[in-house]
Image (cartoon, grey):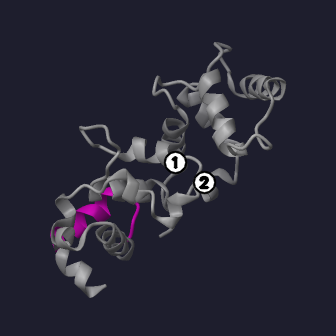
Amino acid sequence: MGGSASLLPRDLLGEYQELTFLSKQEILLAYKRFSELLPKEEREISCSTRVPKSQILTLPELRANPFQHQICRVFSTSEARDDSMSFEDFLDMLSVFSDSATLDIKSHYAFRIFDFDEDGVLDRNDLEKLVNCLTGQGEESRLNSTEMEQLIRNILEESDIDKDGTINLSEFQHVISRCPDFASSFKIVL
């Protein structure tokens, strides 16, 4: 790990520590893991190189996650909208999914991940996609239309405080605040 520390400037390491919920050791490990996703000839400039989404998704921590594509979309700052990640994008992702991140931060990003159409609310379409991600894509595990409709109706009944047919961020955060296991289960550990 000494090799990766020498490629990450000390001033950047301190800055990353201040701006994230990660420790110095976690940042150095993240830098090492991020660098390993790059071709050998690009590892010297890891801080300024973007890793394609296809490479990010090879990480075991994301490979089995049903929201892997949404996670890349939410944390990528790519102007090309290709969901590639810079090292800082990667750090932001790990910071939000760390044990040290606050419930407010975690619930904010969870809401963005679940907002598939990026319109700022969770509507019936978002909820259906969310349920399908959680239950699996196979025919045997997918809910039929009656079951799906009942589940979405139940979710909205429980969560839609203003009764507008959608769940906004504050309604989502209200629901999450009553789920004691949410913060501990919303994590990625390298």
Residue kind at label 1, given as amino acid type: Lys
Tag 2 near tag 1, CB within 8 Å: yes
Image quarter hosting the N terminus = bottom left
Pick out the residue farthest to the bottom.
Answer: 2
The residue indicated by pointer 1 is 106
Residue 46 in the image: state x and y as whole percent: 21, 66
Query: Residue at coordinates 56% horizontally, 29% vertically from top-left?
Result: 170
Residue nearest the observer in this picture, 55 or 124: 55
> Is 154 displayed left or right of 72 in the figure?
right
Residue nearest the observer in this picture, 148 or 181: 148
Query: Residue at coordinates 63% horizontally, 57% vertically from top-left?
Result: 185
Say if residue 105 shows up in the picture.
no
Residues packed near mark 2 inside 10 Å, few (<14), some (14 to 19) or many (20 plus): many
Magenta: main secondary structure equals helix
Which stretch is magenta?
10-23
Residue nearest the observer in this picture, 164 or 39: 39
- Mark 2 and mark 1 lie on one chain; the one further toward the N terminus is 1
Quarter location, residue 17? bottom left
> Is 64 displayed left or right of 50 in the figure?
right
Residues packed near mark 1 inside 10 Å, few (<14), some (14 to 19) or many (20 plus): many
Residue 52 in the image: state x and y as whole percent: 32, 53
Is residue 131 located in the magenta-colored stretch of the structure?
A: no
Pick out the residue farthest to the top.
Answer: 164
Residue kind at label 2, given as amino acid type: Ala
The residue indicated by pointer 2 is 183
Query: Residue at coordinates 45% horizontally, 28% vertically from top-left?
Result: 118
